[in-house]
Amino acid sequence: MKTSEKKIICITGLDGTGKNTLIENLKPLLPPFYLANIWDLLEGDFKERPFTSKREVDGYLCNLTSNSRLLFLAHALKFSIDKALQSSDNIIVVNGYFYKYFASELALNASENLVEALIQNFVKPNLVIELLLSPQVAAERKKRFSRYECGLSKDANANQFIDFQQKASPFWNNFLHTNWHKISTEGSEKESKDLAVNILTTTGFISQNPQNISI
């Protein structure tokens, strides 16, 4: 299938907003799809991977300079979306995508010009669903915190997480919000799923029979 014929759905949002949970809850309602995320490079079947765990990546990121970290994340993201586009799947669901990571990097003083240049190299989704949840509630729900999502703080805790997520939030306005929808995940998992299904249905990505997705 040609790249132009694939349908790309992006589930994104700040750290802790419930992206993984929503994607899992949508799986039974969609036909088989290719799930792309920044960890594909880490989890791929490579004999010479430089990292063996997400914890190692977290430590590495915290030792890079702003723009070098941005480029490292961009290369991992580009790998994941390129592999997805090369797959035989009609549907691609992207977890987070460049929106999440570039917003964080802008909050960490990455170059806006470099971010804008990098964005031009990424295929634009047909639909973006941004999950909204206050950092305070997200912190209460999380079981552990990485240094990266706490603004590179050596002491990764709830307070550092909340402070950095609040700092990153305004940078989401830097992105072009084409085919963009927002839903709150403050409520139950079912409520979030129902809101997402409604968007997917009303925009024509899922038919009235949710077992079939329109392509």
Image (cartoon, rainbow, N blue to C red):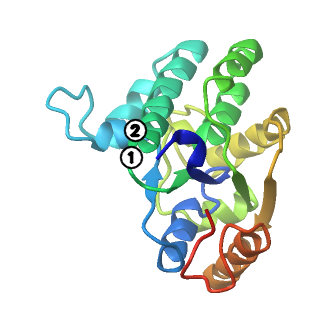
The dot on residue 83 is 2
**x and y, in percent, of residue 113 in the image:** 75, 13
Q: Amino acid at mark 1?
A: Ser
CA gap, disc 1 and disc 2: 6 Å
Residue 47 drawn at (x, y percent)? 14, 31
Q: Amino acid at mark 2?
A: Lys
Q: Nearer the viewer, residue 152 or 20?
A: 20
- Image position, residue 163 (x, y; %): 72, 43
Residue at the (50%, 38%) spot, across then down: 147
Q: For the C terminus, give its image quadrant.
A: bottom right
Contact check, label 1 and label 2, Cβ < 8 Å: yes
How many numbered circles does the render carry? 2
Q: Residues within 10 Å of mark 1 (few under 14, many from 20)?
A: some
Q: Nearer the viewer, residue 154 or 181?
A: 181
> Residue 102, can we see it?
yes
Q: Residue at x 66, y 34 (%)?
A: 104
Residue 140 picture quarter: bottom right
Asked if 38 appears above or below 31 in the picture, the reply is: above
Q: Residue at x 62, y 79 (%)?
A: 189
Q: Label 1: state its secondary structure.
A: loop
Q: Which residue is mark 1?
A: 87
